Image (tube, helix red, strand yellow):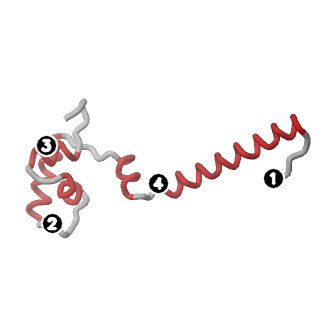
Amino acid sequence: MKGNRITLKDVAEACSYTVNTVSRALRDDPRLPPATRTKIRQTAVTMGYIRNSLASTLRSGKAGMSLFSSMIYITCIFAICSARWTSNCAGPVII
């Protein structure tokens, strides 16, 4: 365990399951037996595990499009500003 934050890996080691199984249990995946989900959830609560919402969002891919859109927007702003700066120095520039 690094620092003070309890990770999925810490919970997995404590209850002798893989990180993937622990992740599924904490998401209440019906593919796992109820007894396994209960054991893992109880271990996580006892250890003080808190879900990292940023990591979960990035892992699920839901943040991908907004990040991509933001990068495109910033690139366009940079290109426009660069073109305006160039046009002030060397005459008109058509984009």
Q: Quick check: 14 left or right of 19?
A: left
Residue for point 12% across, 47% down: 43
Give the class, few, some or many, for how many residues have Cα within 10 Å of label 2's Cα (few <14, many ≥20): few
Give the class, few, some or many, for how many residues have Cα within 10 Å of label 4's Cα (few <14, many ≥20): few
Disc on the earlier residue, 3 or 1: 3
The residue beneath circle 2 is 32
Cα separation between marks 2 and 3: 20 Å
Q: Secondary structure at mark 1?
A: loop
Q: Position of residue 41 (x, y in %)?
A: 16, 53
The kind of residue on which mark 4 rests is Ala
Q: Residue furthest front?
A: 90
Q: Residue furthest top?
A: 3
Vertical comparison of 94 with 2: above or below: below
Which marked residue is nearer to the observer: mark 3 or mark 1?
A: 1
Vertical comparison of 34 with 56: above or below: below
Q: Quick check: 21 left or right of 70?
A: left
